[in-house]
Image (spheres, rainbow, N blue to C red):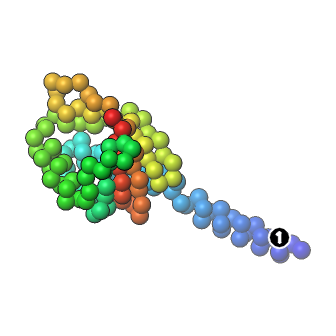
Amino acid sequence: MQLPLTLFFVVLSFFAVGQSSVDPFAAVTPVQTQLDAYNTGDLELFLSAYADDVRLYNFPDELTGEGKDKMRETYGAMFANRPDLQCRLVSRIVMGNRVLDHESVVFDSKSPPVEVVAMYLVEDGLIREVRFLR
């Protein structure tokens, strides 16, 4: 009886370790990468966090952009023309593969920050979709 019970605990511990190695906050990695790149104006690093066919929406479902090429145009111009551009993370909620960030965005030093909630959907380590609530 001792051997089956010991075997049971060995198998149980294997599964427990396997489950604990899964990062419940893996969705945060691309979201934080793009935020850091946004704040340094690093367009290539910023875009590396997104899927090629990413879709951008104004909440709830107004499609405003689709694809990394479109983002390259929009954000490339923004990074080049707005030297004061900064995004401060106010708060973050992570639920599975969804990350909700409350952000305070400064577009230029003469204007007050704009408050935004960005809702990121992450799949296969990349941001697949973003919905902005303004």
Placement of the C terminus among the 4 image quadrants: top left
Quarter of the view holding residue 80 = top left
Residue 62 can be seen, yes or no: yes
How far across and down, in percent of the image, does residue 128 sit?
36, 58
**Image check: 5 left or right of 63?**
right
How far across and down, in percent of the image, does residue 109 sit?
16, 27
- Nearest to the observer: residue 20 or residue 42: 42
Placement of the N terminus among the 4 image quadrants: bottom right
How far across and down, in percent of the image, does residue 23 sit?
51, 56
Residue that appears at 27% across and 34% down = 105
Residue that appears at 10% across and 41% down = 81
How far across and down, in percent of the image, does residue 118 sit?
36, 42
**Image check: 13 left or right of 80?**
right
- Read off the residue under disc 1: 5
Residue that appears at 13% across and 38% down = 82
Asked if residue 102 is positioned above or below residue 12 in the image, the reply reads above
Disc 1, SS: helix
- Nearest to the observer: residue 107 or residue 70: 70
**Image check: 62 left or right of 97?**
left
- Nearest to the observer: residue 112 or residue 53: 53
Quarter of the view holding residue 54 = bottom left
Asked if residue 84 is positioned above or below residue 68 in the image, the reply reads above
- Nearest to the observer: residue 134 or residue 81: 134
